[in-house]
Amino acid sequence: MDSGKPKLWNFSAGPAILPPVVLERAAEAVHELRQDGHARDAAGVGMSILEISHRSAPYEAITFGAEKLVHEVLGVPETHQVLFLQGGASLQFVMVPMNLREADKFAAYVDTGVWSGRAIAESEGLGATHVLASSKATNYDRIPEFPAADSYAGASYLHITTNNTIYGTEYPEVPEAQGGVPLVIDFSSHAGARPMALERAALGYAGAQKNLGPSGVTLVYVRKDLLAKKPAAHVPVYLRYATHAKEPSLYNTPNTFGVLVLKLVLEWMRDEGGLAAIGARNERKAQRLYDVLDNSKVFQPHAQPGSRSLMNVTWTCGRAPEAQREALAKKFLAEAQALGFDGLKGHRSVGGFRASIYNAFPEAGVAALCEFIAEFERRL
């Protein structure tokens, strides 16, 4: 660090930026874990978090404390069981249909990009799958209209991806599924970004490496009545949600370090004022950047108004003459990297640029990027 400014502004889509206080406490815990995971205000346990038993009292305090904070900070209702699993959201693409699919019922999905597409592919391998809405025709630049209730009536469940990291789109709010059909949400890249009606989902899952911690931990919350339903006999024991609920996220050795960091992040979120304060800050960051892009004569946001993500802002050189776009993009990225703006290259599905401005990303970094964009355009 130099005068409070990092050497690099980390715009990576994930693994993503973490709060400095979390990094400090996690680093201390690598040397010696403190009681309940607190590195500054409690006695040491004599071992590193990397070597402590997951069956020990200090680790149980961490995992149960993290579970409590998921309810308190993120707003997951007590009607749902919290689980800390491994395998990322990608494993959930498989576990959801394995556990929730009912005989002779189809699974319903909304297609909003690459990750929902992978979830759909896994479901198709296990049974009848209906894609009820898609924004593929416009390269996923918007959230499609939520399906009518009669289109998913009788489905085993309805699955949506609430924030699409690659395309920079986001559901403005968690929708409600009708007729008792369970709603499943992949909210990986905006978990904890703002207050959300998470109670509307029967099951939600999020890879921690965007807003909640390091890679290697997946937060899952599932309505307790669904845990009572026995999955098909062919579903392996390890891939049953009930298995992990019965042995509260301790059926196999968990990612002990990752769960500690997740807990520290949730404590930081709580201390920052909770989701209301964090959401307001994220709104300011995103709006400032979108305002610059909307008023640019060179750059063009990919996501349409009304569908724009607070976490992942995507744009191209779409307002420049077509013959100049590729050269301009290379020039922009080279100059940005030289100035310490890291991770701005867009995903190949969209091209251009992507700024991931997760919870821990400071407003000063967004301001610096906006100034660079304006200055770059003035020099053309």
Image (cartoon, rainbow, N blue to C red):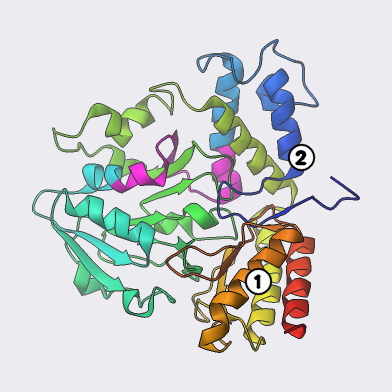
As rendered, which of 370 and 22 lies closer to the eye? 370
Residue 266: mark: none
Residue placed furthest toward the right: 3
Residue 21: mark: 2
The location of residue 90, given as percent across then percent down, is: 36, 46
- Residue span colored magenta: 68-93
Answer whether residue 354 is magenta in the image.
no
Give the side of residue 159 with respect to residue 276, left or right: left
Residue 271 vs 233, above or below: the answer is: below
Q: Residue at x 59, y 40 (%)?
A: 69
Dividing the picture into quadrants, the one containing residue 181 is bottom left
* Amino acid on which the number 2 mark rests in the picture: Val
The location of residue 371, given as percent across then percent down, is: 78, 74
- The local crowd at label 2, few if under 14, some if 14 to 19, many if 20 or more residues have their Cα within 10 Å, is few
Residue 58 vs 161, above or below: the answer is: above
Dividing the picture into quadrants, the one containing residue 156 is bottom left
Residue 331: mark: 1
SS state under label 1: helix
Dividing the picture into quadrants, the one containing residue 128 is bottom left
